[in-house]
Image (tube, rainbow, N blue to C red):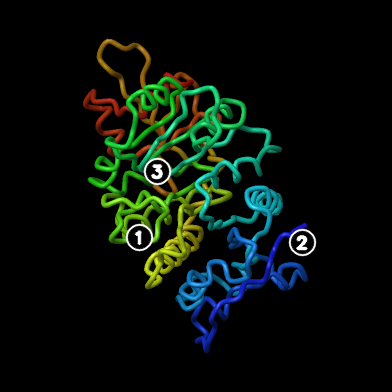
Amino acid sequence: MIKELCIKPVFEGGNYSDHQVATKIGSLSDFLSEKSKPVIALICEGSEATNYADFRKAFYRMSANFPKGALVDLGNVKGGAVGITEMVDQLQRKGILSIVLSNSEQLPHAIIRAFSTINRPLHLNIIESRLDYSWQENKELPHLLDKLIPLYPQQLSRLNFLGYQSYFVDERVLKLLKMMHFETHRLGMLRSSIKEVEPIVRDGDIFGLNIGALAYTDAPAALDVNPNGFTAFEACQIARYAAMSDRLSSIGFYGYAPNEDVKGLTALLLAQMAWYVVQGFYQRRNEYPINPEDLIRYEVHLSGDNIPIAFFKSRRSERWWFYVEPNAKSADLDPEGLISCSYEDYLNTCTGDVPERILNAFDRE
């Protein structure tokens, strides 16, 4: 099936040094002949061999931050969303992390469909500046959110929207998402402390980033251009944080308009984000599923509440989680009940200022 879906990419090559991606990355033929045993696969949506040529031209010249053969470029995928779903399905069955590039803003939904056979609900993180939703019953042109909400809770148990901009968002949508106990994080709040993105995305199975959520000066070739948004530096940091998640199986970048990329700036940024995904993958702590014996338990007793909030710190990585059933014994911890947080979340809770995402998690469960 993979052979029938993929097209060998064509792009401007050249002479490469032995430290560059081009000399370490595997090809579709390597993958099919089992000459390489990749742990990460790159795929791009498009039926033409030249699709994403500028991206590959930039990516292949970057310094290789992975062992030879660990990353494979499977080329361009035919069949639109259906083709992407089939490809991601095949890759996740082999335990391979997929990096997917597409211009379609429905990419996260196409990726989710690839996990329909997984017998546990998924955790999805999305970077979006807009949270559009169709309130009418007849939805001829559905928004991404229209397709995601019906998946709750059978297929989708946690959904985090990061980087939304208030002037683009209907307050009713925020209330709807809050009622469903999904998380929404405003752009300004995240930019004030970008490191707080790491615990938010740490539990994710799937991650999506809309190029339109980045500032125009940093990503001018977005389908939905925007004067405000994350910077290129922040986008790369977020891509690394997402890939550090031990659970992450697929990461997608979408909303790219190649025809608008006159000087290839956005293609270069996409290449840099893909590079940081690989770096994040090799910085994983391998703590999922979490072994209770590796955790130190802390309890926070709030005034007027007889039930403490249980926090846990990893002995190995010193990262933090809280648990939605605080009375459970450490030996009985269910990994699905552990929700990642930061040390600052713990400190704020100690002062009685319980973060919204902790309150939201207890309401959800």
Relative image position of residue 347 (x, y in whole percent): 26, 33
The residue that mark 1 highlights is: 219
The residue that mark 2 highlights is: 4
| Helix, strand or loop under label 3 | loop
Image mark for residue 128: 3
Q: Is residue 322 above or below residue 278?
A: above
Q: Write the residue at 40% across / 71% down.
A: 264
| Helix, strand or loop under label 1 | loop
Q: Write the residue at 52% across / 31% down.
A: 146
Q: Amino acid at mark 2?
A: Glu
Disc 1/disc 3 C-alpha distance (Å)? 14 Å
Disc 1/disc 2 C-alpha distance (Å)? 33 Å
Q: Amino acid at mark 3?
A: Glu
Q: Residues within 10 Å of mark 2 (few under 14, many from 20)?
A: few
Relative image position of residue 353 (x, y in whole percent): 24, 25
**Front in this rendered view, residue 68 or 55:** 55
Q: Write the residue at 56% across / 32% down.
A: 156
Instruction: Give the mark nearest the N terminus, 3 or 2.
Output: 2
**Front in this rendered view, residue 324 or 298:** 324
Relative image position of residue 230 (x, y in whole percent): 31, 52
